[in-house]
Amino acid sequence: SLCGPEASAPQASYTPRKSRQQCEACEQRAALSVCAGAMASARGACALLAAMTLARDAALAAEAPPQPLSWSEAYAKADETLAKMTLPLLHVSGMCQRQMFADGLLFQKRGVTATGSPYYGAAGYYLYHDPHCDGKHSTKGRWIIQEGHPDVERKMDLDTDGECSKDIQHESDDTSLPPMGKRSWWMQCLGGPVMERRSLTLREVPQGEKLTLLKGVGWEHPLGSWYDLRKWWYIGNTVAIPRLGVPSLNMQDAASGFRTNFPEVVGSVTVWPSLLAMGATWDPPLVKAFGEALGREFAGKGANGILGPSVNVHRAARNGRNFEYMSG
């Protein structure tokens, strides 16, 4: 019994053995006063059952989730959506290391600015034409690539910073299309504010929308640093295709709880029991309830894909991720 003494342990260390009904009440309602004198492993087991019971109770109290499509319906809908992915996208390549975050992005057309020029976006970066990027009429027009949405209602200085020196830019008075092919652009490549001339290549990719489903975004490689995850992005991301109603894929670790990539998230997540312990319960309804509660928490934080739970055979006992696998 998890709620009473084991025969192999000193009797004085435990509370008196309870009846079967009382023990079940302890397991289901986490009566810690009953379990307080149990040995450490028994207390841990009661805590595990208490956490899983909370997850099950929360799942039962919640509204029933929408019914998923059948596999045949899902494949049919996917084929229908793929057939509509016909618009070409703009591919940008040739950036220096400091700007590698935007190298290889596939820019989607997002609309037009107040001057009637098209502007493009991808993964939080934008390509647009600014007639006077510092707000001065004497400054020539140029195409700009920047992080952050421009104010497309303005007719000049669309990033509102009053200067041009921080932007990736190419001087041009042609407001109808970005400079296609291989052209000279100016950008900051080293640690200082010095602008350098680089050859960037812009080209149309006929199957661009489909390719965005295969290309992850969100990780940067700053100068002199290792790869970093951009603030408020998920561990794995693909860009959305708004015109077709295709959402971005926001994947996050993992089944033990929402990964705290940023300090602001600490203290706002649930630490769930390990999947190895879940599998040891041999209780499919209980594990299902845990999965539903886990999914609701991830969805509440904007994730629509969980990188787990995992089902795997433990081939190496020293594997540091064995706790993540439901099978032993």
Image: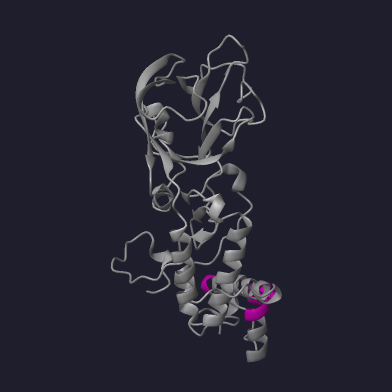
Task: Between residue 318 and residue 282, name the one nearer to us.
Answer: 282
Please count the marks in the image. Answer: 0
Q: What residue appears at the point 64 percent right and 87 percent down from the top-left corner?
A: 18
The residue drawn where x is 60% and y is 60% is: 299
| Residue pictured at 43% horizontal, 35% vertical | 101
Q: Can residue 53 be seen in this view?
A: yes
Q: On the picture, is 221 further left or further right than 139?
A: left
- Residue 224 seen by the camera: no
Which residue occupies the foreground of this view, 237 or 213?
213
213 magenta-colored:
no
Q: Residue furthest bottom?
A: 20
Q: Please name the predominant secondary structure of the magenta segment in the image.
A: helix
- Along the horizontal axis of the image, is 279 left or right of 162? left
Q: Which residue is at the front of the view, 306 or 137?
A: 137
Quick check: is 35 in the magenta stretch?
Answer: yes
Q: In which quarter of the image is the N terminus?
A: bottom right
Residue in front for this viewpoint, 41 or 59: 59
Q: Check the image and tell me how it is coloured.
A: one colour
Q: Where is residue 256 in the image (x, y as percent from the top left)?
A: 51, 62
Image coords of residue 34 (percent x, y): 67, 77
| Image height of 256 relative to 199, above or below | below
- As displayed, is residue 235 above or below residue 227? below
Q: Work out which residue is located at the far top of the displayed protein and give it.
A: 138
Q: Give the range drawn in magenta.
A: 27-41
Q: From what the image shows, is residue 325 above or below residue 22? A: above
Q: Is residue 60 positioned above or below 262 on the image?
A: below
- Residue 53, image x, y percentages: 63, 75
Q: Position of residue 125 (x, y in %)?
A: 51, 35
Q: In which quarter of the image is the C terminus?
A: bottom left
Rendered residue at 63%/15% (across/down): 135
Is 37 placed left or right of 235 in the picture?
right
